[in-house]
Amino acid sequence: MACLLEAPLRISVLSEVTATSRHYVDRLFDPDPQKVLQGVIDMKNAVIGNNKQKANLIVLGAVPRLLYLLQQSSSSLQLRTECAVVLGSLAMGTENNIKSLVDCHIIPTLLQGLLCPDLVFTEACLRCLRTVFISPVTPVQLLYTDPTVIPHLMSLLSNSQRTQEYITQIFSHCCKTPEHQTVLFNHGAIQNIAPLLISPSYKVRMQALKCFSVLAYENTQVSMTLVNVLVDGEQLTQVFVKMMQRDQPVEMQLTAAKCLTYMCRAGAIRTDDGCIVLKTLPCLVRMCSKEHLLEERVEGAETLAYLMEPDVELQRIASTTDHLVAMLADYFKYPSSVSAIADIKRLDHDLKHAHELRQAAFKLYASLGSNDEDIRKKPILESGVIELLCSLTQSDSPALRVNGIWALMNMAFQADQKVKVEIVRCLGTEQLFRLLSDPDANVLMKTLGLLRNLLSTRPHIDQIMSSHGKQIMQAVTLILEAEHSIEVKEQTLCILANIADGNTAKELIMTNDDILQKIKYYMGHSNVKLQLAATFCVSNLIWNEEDGSQDRQDKLREMGFVDVLHKLTQSADPNLSDRAKTALQQYLA
């Protein structure tokens, strides 16, 4: 059966099929083996760099015939090898070509071919397999269908530099899940691939390094094993450190930094280890600078954000290294001038990466601003980043609005008053309340998160509510009345609980009977999360040690809150029951 392209392409391609293309395929069926071989060699020369010719030959059924000839033991080794070479060339065409090859079962056929002891033939099969597997349209699971394949590939690693390059490239592209990591680990990937890191071939070293980065990602077992591996008497971590040196190609520096980052995040290397603080971190910061390609800057920024996300000390070091915060502000300026880019393909490339650059910068801002006060206070305030993020919340793109708000939310977390005031000033109350009615649920959630972070610690709560209290209470009321998810309502009630914790701010709740009734309603809601948040709000309003608590307790008793609290002490949920009991104790004290 002919292996056809997908329907939309079939008609246009068939209409262009030439007599020459037919002639190439017809020669594959000649009874004379020598003519078949010459036909395959001529076909190989005809398809190089010619995607139209490749598509024609696929439509005319060349693939099943080439696969048949490749499998026949009666075919000469030279013919079988030339068939593998032509198939590899066809695979270098379009994604539709790859789909056609996969549909014709090229993968199991080539994997079977690897059992042949001839090196040149197995290299040709591996080169074609590599090309097929690195395509995004190929299902990587096909590598794992037959359990004998991975151990056989491991055994072929020592055959030649080419087999090493192709096999490690296949592994690094096909290791997508924890299950894949486990299969490769259990079949000796680490001990088989580690020696390749000092191969004389750059391509082999590079592919081996990529293998380790995908194996170590979020995998404690692999990372803990890698720490103890020796390569030619040297610790593997030191081999990675050498690969990060400035005289190495950027691709190698970045991938080595990724390996050490993933090992660190998996708990195999301490965050204060010299190879992280003195080598990996500076290498990744270096990758964020203007001198690098857009793709490299994206990868560097994303990896750096991942490395320092949980660690305050790394955030502090990064924020003061090589003007990192100022460098990130540049990430929002691409492409710098559309008119200056004459090449449409280049423009398309730059626009795509401009979006990725912004996303990477958001991740880094979020990491930098998430844990440490000093970092937020100085470099971020001075860099003009807050204005930049506030302007992005006005974007037409929901993704940019979400990311802008998300970064501001992280900056506001446990921030000092100066940072919070600057955020409110730059954002403006009108924009804040526009975001609170945003049709995108993610934007709304992140805006509520920002508001909750702004309204934390009493002096901050009182100051912000004294200037913006009326609008905030209005927004809260609208959200609690509208059709929103449980998560949105819970976040809104948590904001009310924060307001209730203010010294003067709580009066904005106590003088608003409508809001009090809503709090009472949510205490009796069917969802425990909402009941907890509403009860927490009441606790803050009636807390004994604060001025005016007696008056507030009396008012809430009159409104029936005490009866509701008594009911909640009988709740099956232990947290809710405990919180209700704590609130009731305020009346008894």
Image: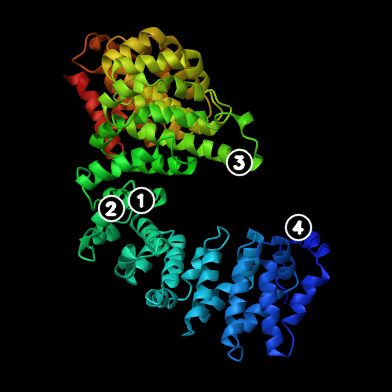
Q: From this viewpoint, is residue 324 visible?
A: yes
Expressed as whole percent of the image width and height from the top left, the position of residue 428 reads 46, 14
Residue kind at label 1, given as amino acid type: Gln
Residue kind at label 4, given as amino acid type: Pro
Q: Are marks 2 and 1 in contact (CB under 8 Å)?
A: yes
Q: Spatial distance from mark 4 to mark 3, Cα to Cα?
A: 28 Å
Q: Residue at x 58, y 90 (%)?
A: 73
| Above/below status of 176 relative to 245 | below
Numbered disc 3: secondary structure = helix
Query: Circle 3 is placed at which residue position?
Result: 346
Q: From this viewpoint, is residue 491 visible?
A: no
Expressed as whole percent of the image width and height from the top left, the position of residue 327 reads 40, 30
Instruction: Check the picture and name the quadrant holding the N terminus.
Output: bottom right
Query: Circle 1 is placed at which residue position?
Result: 248
Query: Circle 2 is placed at which residue position?
Result: 242
Q: Earlier in the sequence, mark 4 or mark 3?
A: 4
Q: Earlier in the sequence, mark 4 or mark 1?
A: 4
Q: How many marks?
A: 4
Q: Is residue 148 left or right of residue 121?
A: left
Instruction: Check the picture and name the quadrant holding the C terminus.
Output: top left
Q: Spatial distance from mark 3 to mark 1, Cα to Cα?
A: 27 Å
Q: Spatial distance from mark 3 to mark 2, Cα to Cα?
A: 34 Å
Q: Earlier in the sequence, mark 2 or mark 1?
A: 2
